[in-house]
Amino acid sequence: MFLRAIGRPLLARVKQTTGIVGLDVVPNARAVLINLYSKTLKEIKAVPEDEGYRKAVETFTKHRLTVCEEEEEWEKIEERIDCGQVEEAQDELKLIGKMIEWDPWGVPDDHECEIIENDAPIPKHVPRHIPGPLPAEFYQTLEAVLTKRVEPKGAPAVTSGESQSKA
């Protein structure tokens, strides 16, 4: 018992670097993450309950908190969370503060957005995502669906009043 309680932390692998310039290693990452995720769950309560942003943050933060409570080693935590390094986890908490400040959910229902149409040419260095033409089969199928009911190949046609299942 004594060796487990004292020896395990001493034998644990120590993270040497984050590999990101200017981002120092957090020696007690698990404890920091548990505190950070708990704080995130408290902060997000300031966002209206029905907002998608709050629902998403609560969902992934609860998952990450559970992972931190289940795992002891930083490597396993990073692997299971699969979202960067433990040292990068403070970003969401900062974003919550900004979202509360910006209040994007506070737009009145009757607010009208101005649509600005600009016919200026798109610069050559900006990629254009114009999908190619669809195959002719697509248009044939679309036309068939719009004009009449389409039956699967090989299936007998069902007329009104008949049942598809035969007893």
Image: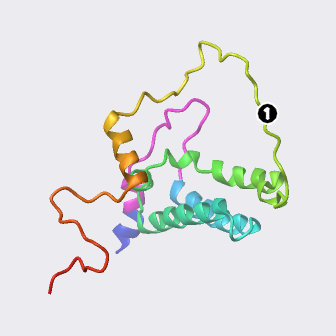
* The N terminus - image quarter: bottom left
Q: Is residue 5 visible?
A: yes
Q: Nearer the viewer, residue 141 or 10?
A: 141
State the SS at label 1. Answer: loop
Across and down, in percent, residue 46 comes to: 76, 67
For the residue marked with disc 1, what is the amino acid? Ile
Choose top left, top right, bottom left or bottom right for residue 126: top right
Quarter location, residue 28 = bottom right
Q: Residue furthest top?
A: 124
State the residue at coordinates (35%, 59%): 149
| Quadrant containing the C terminus in the rendered view | bottom left
Residue located at (64% from left, 62% from top): 52
Residue at figure coordinates x 42%, y 68% from the top left: 70
Visible residue check, residue 26: no
Q: Position of residue 80 (x, y in %)?
A: 40, 56
Residue 15 image offset from top left, x and y in percent: 45, 43
Q: Give the extent of the magenta segment.
A: 8-27
Percent coordinates x, y for residue 159 in the rendering: 27, 72
